[in-house]
Image (cartoon, rainbow, N blue to C red):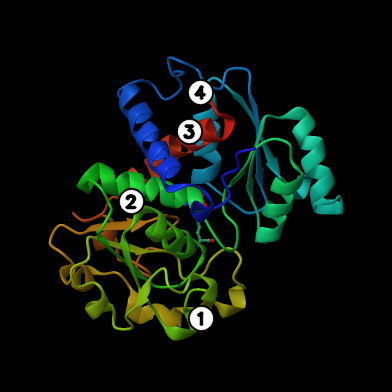
Amino acid sequence: MTHFLDIHKTDPGDLHAIIDQAQAMKTARKGQPKGMPDADMPLAGQMVALIFEKPSTRTRVSFDVGVRQMGGQTMVLSGADMQLGHGETIADTARVLSRYVDLIMMRTFEEDTLLEMAEYATVPVINGLTNRTHPCQIMADIMTFEEHRGPIKGKKVVWSGDGNNVFASFAHAAKQFDFDLVFTGPEPLDPESSLAGLYTTVRDPHEAVQGADLVVTDTWVSMHDPQSARERRHNQLRGYQVNEALMADAKDDALFMHCLPAHRDDEATSSVMDGPHSVIFDEAENRLHAQKAIMRYCLGV
Ligand code: CP
Ligand code: NVA
């Protein structure tokens, strides 16, 4: 069974192959209408369940479109509408769904929910974001970096802001793809301790971004964070906003990324998001291509 649960759980050779296939599939369908199926229809006859226990725009639409482009069919399920949200166990849900569908993508809160789904499912399970990680996003980000700048190996990536789930997947990727990752953010919002050794910390953001090939940030309040923490987090993170002054201290040709959704002029200014360094909409597009390759990898097609 080939799940895609986290970047550090997948072999680096397989990760590179996924990115290469994503790029080849993107190139192959350039200029085609988005609803046109891929020539080889690798998911023909396959049924994919997309389960969301949290809101989503990109993940929902890109997985749905990706499956359809590959000739498969989807059903988008809200956790709250399933018996899962009303007391049925994850293990039973996993075993039942496995009788109906060929692949499960899940966005949930606790990582344990995803892991239990993967343990009991008899079909592959893909992580569509948990409170701890967001591996599909970072596969799209690596693809985007390499599309613009070539291999990410040996490059300097700087994360400015909250040490959250998206950062965690960047940290896993730093090891697998062999790039240098620097975290700059306030100590109370440091990444979880299990990631120690995968990145270095530089508290001063202007010092941190010196020589950066890529500057990344994300929302200051994630979906799983309590709204009551909003004001405190904003106060802690204000100094880590990615603005033109910060980008000016990175390399001249540094890229800027944000997984979106963004809160414009909080974690990043509109001038950076819409400016010459930004590749945020390429990132969003590449979710589609990267996830198509991830699904093919999981299904072995
Ligand atoms: N970046 C991302 O996962 O976006 P959604 O929450 O819209 O899926
Ligand atoms: N860190 C954000 C990412 C959203 C795609 C969250 O978990 O809400």
- Distance between the alpha carbons at the discs numbered 1 and 3: 38 Å
**Nearer to the camera, 54 or 29:** 29
Q: Point out residue 275 in the picture as x, y percentages from the top left corner.
A: 21, 56
Give amino acid for label 4.
Answer: Met
Q: Residue furthest right?
A: 87
Q: Which residue is mark 4?
A: 70
The residue located at (49%, 84%) in the rendering is 188
Mark 2 and mark 4: Cα distance apart in space: 25 Å
Which corner quadrant of the image does residue 18 belong to? top left
Kindly tell me whether mark 4's CB lies below 8 Å from ligand 1.
no
Q: Which residue is mark 3?
A: 292
Sequence-earlier tag: 1 or 3: 1
2 or 1: tag closer to the N-terminus = 1
Q: Does the image show residue 109?
A: no
In the rendered view, would you say 192 is above or below 92?
below
Q: Residue at x 63, y 54 (%)?
A: 54
Q: What's the residue type where badge 1 is placed?
A: Glu
Q: Residues within 10 Å of mark 3 (few under 14, many from 20)?
A: many
Q: Quote the CA–CA distance across marks 3 and 2.
A: 19 Å
* Residue contact between numbered discs 3 and 4, judged by CB atoms under 8 Å: yes
Residue type, label 2: Ile
Residues under labels 2 and 1: Cα distance? 26 Å
Toward the viewer: 17 or 28?
A: 17
Q: Secondary structure at mark 3?
A: helix
Q: Which residue is denoted by mark 2 in the rendering?
A: 280
Mark 1 or mark 4, earlier in chain: 4
Give the residue at mark 1.
231
